[in-house]
Image: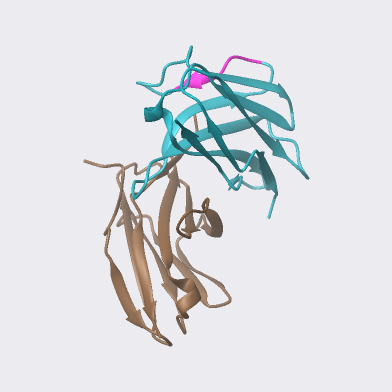
Chain colours: A cyan, B brown
């Protein structure tokens, strides 16, 4: 399968600071990437869809000014959590969509565990 | 009504048994169906994709799709303790967004 990387794998930051998470597709070009958040013992929650060269599409209830997404190239999307608060502590996972020749498949990065103190 | 429904479990099976995981979806126009495995504290891993009615086998895994009944299942033969994880059913909607919609997941425990 396709490989998606994320950096950092975990980060601890103080309340009020900003944190940037990088998502890269390593062996393919991804015109579309997705950002998810997962709280303990809960299912994945889609935050936004990131398209290369255009603005991200945010899901209802997700603050676009707080969660800044930049899809700068076909292999890189970044999520910046601005003015982080303890309630933003979560597991953030990116995903990239790849066309297999007949249909689409979606592969996930390893995730970034964010703890805001 | 949830778009993708799974029995949350937990489902426990003894080692060597067949584990059967089920999923139903509401969008009749959906064409693409996936099973992901997620270990605790890790991100989801794609294990099976299926697009046509019938069975698709890959090693110990068999995915079954019945579009008329809007039903997709995953069978795990010869279950191993290492199969213990949460299994997520996902469906690509028929809309223009074509994004994945996940079920809430079924927690599987394989008992040694």
Evaluate whether residue B20 shows in this view.
Answer: yes
Q: For residue A106, what is the image quadrant?
A: top right
Q: Main secondary structure of the magenta part?
A: loop
- On screen, residue A38 versus residue B1, left or right, reads right
Evaluate whether residue B95 shows in this view.
Answer: no
| Residue A21 x, y percent position in the rendering | 62, 31
| Residue B56 x, y percent position in the rendering | 52, 68
Q: Residue at horizontal 61%, vertical 43%? A: A9
- Looking at the rendered image, the quarter that the C terminus of chain B falls into is bottom left
- In the rendered image, the vertical position of residue B23 relative to residue A105, given as above or below: below
Q: Is residue A56 magenta?
A: yes
Magenta stretch bounds: A54-58
- In the rendered image, the vertical position of residue B15 relative to residue A114, given as above or below: below
| Residue B25 x, y percent position in the rendering | 32, 49
Determine the residue located farthest toward the left in the rendered image.
B1
Q: For residue B68, what is the image quadrant?
A: bottom left
- Looking at the rendered image, the quarter that the N terminus of chain B falls into is top left
Residue placed most toward the observer, A96 or A7: A7
Q: Residue at horizontal 48%, vertical 11%? A: A65
Determine the residue located farthest toward the right in the rendered image.
A27
Q: Residue at horizontal 66%, vertical 42%? A: A98
């Amino acid at each position: 399968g396709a490989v998606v990387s994320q950096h950092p794998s975990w980060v601890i930051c103080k309340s009020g600071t900003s944190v940037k998470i990088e998502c890269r597709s390593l062996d393919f070009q991804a015109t579309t990437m997705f950002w998810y958040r997962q709280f303990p013992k809960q299912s994945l929650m889609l935050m936004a869809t990131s398209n290369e060269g255009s603005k991200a599409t945010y899901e209802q209830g997700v603050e676009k000014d707080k969660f800044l997404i930049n899809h700068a190239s076909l292999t890189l999307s970044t999520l910046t959590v601005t003015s982080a608060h303890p309630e933003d502590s979560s597991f953030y996972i990116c995903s990239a969509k790849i066309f297999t020749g007949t249909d689409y498949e979606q592969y996930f990065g390893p995730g970034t565990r964010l703890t805001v103190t | 009504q949830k778009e993708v429904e799974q029995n949350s479990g937990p489902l426990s099976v003894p080692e060597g048994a067949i584990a059967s995981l089920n999923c139903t979806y509401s969008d009749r126009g959906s064409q693409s169906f996936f099973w992901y495995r997620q270990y605790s504290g890790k991100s989801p891993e794609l294990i099976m994709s299926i697009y046509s009615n019938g069975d698709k086998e890959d090693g110990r895994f068999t995915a079954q799709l019945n579009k008329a009944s809007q039903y997709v299942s995953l069978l795990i033969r010869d279950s191993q303790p290492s199969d213990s994880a949460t299994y997520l059913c996902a469906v690509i909607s028929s809309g223009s967004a074509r994004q994945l919609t996940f079920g809430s997941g079924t927690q599987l425990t394989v008992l040694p």
